[in-house]
Image (tube, coloured by chain):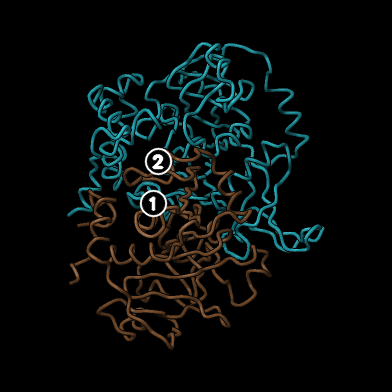
Chain colours: A brown, B cyan
Amino acid sequence: MTRPYNPTQLLAYIAAGLLEDNSSVFVGTGLPMIAGMLAQRTHAPNLLIIFEAGGIGPRVPVLPISVGDSRTFHRAVSASSMHDVMSASQAGYVDYGFLGAAQIDPYGNLNTTVIGDWRHPVVRFPGSGGANDVGSLCGRTIIVMRQDPRRFVERLDFVTTPGYLDGPGARARAGLPANTGPYRVITQLGLYDFEETTKRMRLLATHPGFSVDDVQRATSFELIVSKDLQTTEPPPSDVLDTMRDIDPTGMVIGD
Amino acid sequence: MNVLQEGQGELVGWHDPDEHRAWVAEHKTRALKDKRTTVKAAVEEYVRDGALMACGGFGHIRVSMAVIYEIIRQQKRDLTLCGKTAVHDSDVLIGAGCVNRIEVAYAFGHELRGLSPASRRAAESGRCEVVAEISNAGYQWRFLAAAMGLPFIPSRVMLGTDTLKRSSAKVIEDPFSGKPILLLPACYPDIVLMHVHRCDRYGNAQIDGIVIEDFELARAARRMILTTEEIVDDEVIRQAPQETVIPYYLVDAVVEVPYGAHPTLMPGRYYFDEQHIGEWLRLSKTEEGVAEYLDRYVYDVEGFSCYLKRIGGDEQLEYLRQVEHLEAPLEAPWLEEKRK
């Protein structure tokens, strides 16, 4: 029996499932935080959660509003600094990083800066924040965002955060750390990885109720589809309960 | 040196290290002197029109709002802001017309609350010019280079992106590894505002919880105004010197302002005032609303204690203390919207 769930709950469930126990993850507020906390309360009790403002290994009591919120170092192993956690990322101590974006291209490059021309933007977004740092320095980045044809585009208006840039070998040529880059993309329609030889996005699974056609219609570039296409598992009942415990007010997951 | 790429963003706050040493020799006293003053006097003396300014804390965490309100009250103009996770601080300063240039790591947003109407309107209309882009790590390492008295510091962020193209950084071939490496130029803000938990009258300051990038920023600052929840006897500092983040010689002015970070979060003391921030976000959707807000909470206010009465007084402050200590549930207008 599947209980009704909303798209945010499904995304958080899938994201949590990607995180291995005894690994470290750089999280932002919102859905990544839910995913990290959910992983800790299910299969990954020793997941090390790190916040960009300096919170390391907190026992997060309630959802933080900010990545610098007191909740991000509540009963933490260390209340440190941005220099410390960014240096740890640069030195290779951070396995996973979460990112969101306004636009993504086939190589997993992300735009959170502007829509339109940089000098005369139609829409001005907040910019990199820590996103470029996470996308440059963490081992595997997990991108969680909404999918539609204006967001899944062949060319970004602005490359804020590096994915695989223009293809295989490009990150190394640019000087980015070895063995880093986008690992998975999760949207309300499906789950993606990056095909090894081209470094282009590949559909791994569709969510229950969505077809490959639905996914392609929401994508403005040619999508590679896995030969072994799966359908994602909906979140089990007990997981939905745990999520409600994590976010009792529905701040992120809604009602 | 083989320069592989140069960002086209404007270089703000850079000084030749020897020029900076000379400036320090001339302007920064090592005398252990009483620096207590008022917010009004400190802003009059140290915040100049056209200056490059940075706020300690994290945009809506531990921000010296008391000084920001005074900057608005004194109608300082043409400030350039270091947008190093700039949230409520930059939104109010840009909305009030004090800041018209910004280098952006993060600005125009309110994290989970969404985008910031006032500063976003200014950015999209060109009233506030974005002079360069950078990342959060990149910005705090610019301050680290300055704190170390170096012209630049190498890093592996921003490579391969438009963030780099619009930044003031350069890429060279690392003479050790042979790989491309980013060089972040030092940044010395003309004026830094910072709010701390406690300090003594000389400016020896302690911060509870994460320091974010205030260790580096305090050392990069040319002038620094420190506001504090409480001024303590210097013996209190000397009994726990390991807690001191900022030594006195970095500080130019010390002002005791309890709740001086309101409505931003002060770790261990008081949580975000979501009612107040919500009121700002609602009113700042229009220019008339911005004016209404500033009249009510800045211009028509006699001192910070009058401001605290206007935001709800002791009852509201007690509630914020309880939320911070997980003793009361969080209520927020934007949260109500989301629940609908």
Give the quarter of the figure containing the N terminus of chain B.
bottom right
Provide residue B51's location: percent of width, then percent of height: 57, 35
Identify the residue at image location x=55%, y=65%.
A162
- Amino acid type at circle 2 is Asp
The chain letter under disc 1 is A
Q: Are the residues under marks 1 and 2 on the same chain? A: yes
Identify the residue at image location x=28%, y=36%.
B276
* For residue A105, above or below residue B76: below
* For residue A234, above or below residue B191: below
The chain letter under disc 2 is A
- Amino acid type at circle 1 is Thr
Gap between marks 1 and 2 measured at Cα: 10 Å
Q: Hey, which quadrant is residue B29 in on the image?
A: top right
A16, A122: nearer the viewer = A16
* For residue B122, above or below residue A138: above
Dot 1 or dot 2: first in sequence order is 1
Q: How many marks?
A: 2
C-beta proximity under 8 Å, tags 1 and 2: yes
B132, A47: nearer the viewer = A47
Provide residue A209's location: percent of width, then percent of height: 24, 79
Provide residue B46's location: percent of width, then percent of height: 56, 25
Q: Which residue is mark 1?
A: A29
Q: Which residue is mark 2?
A: A69
* Left or right placement of residue B182 versus residue B36 in this view: right
Q: Secondary structure at mark 2?
A: loop
Q: Secondary structure at mark 1?
A: loop
Give the quarter of the figure containing the C terminus of chain B.
bottom left
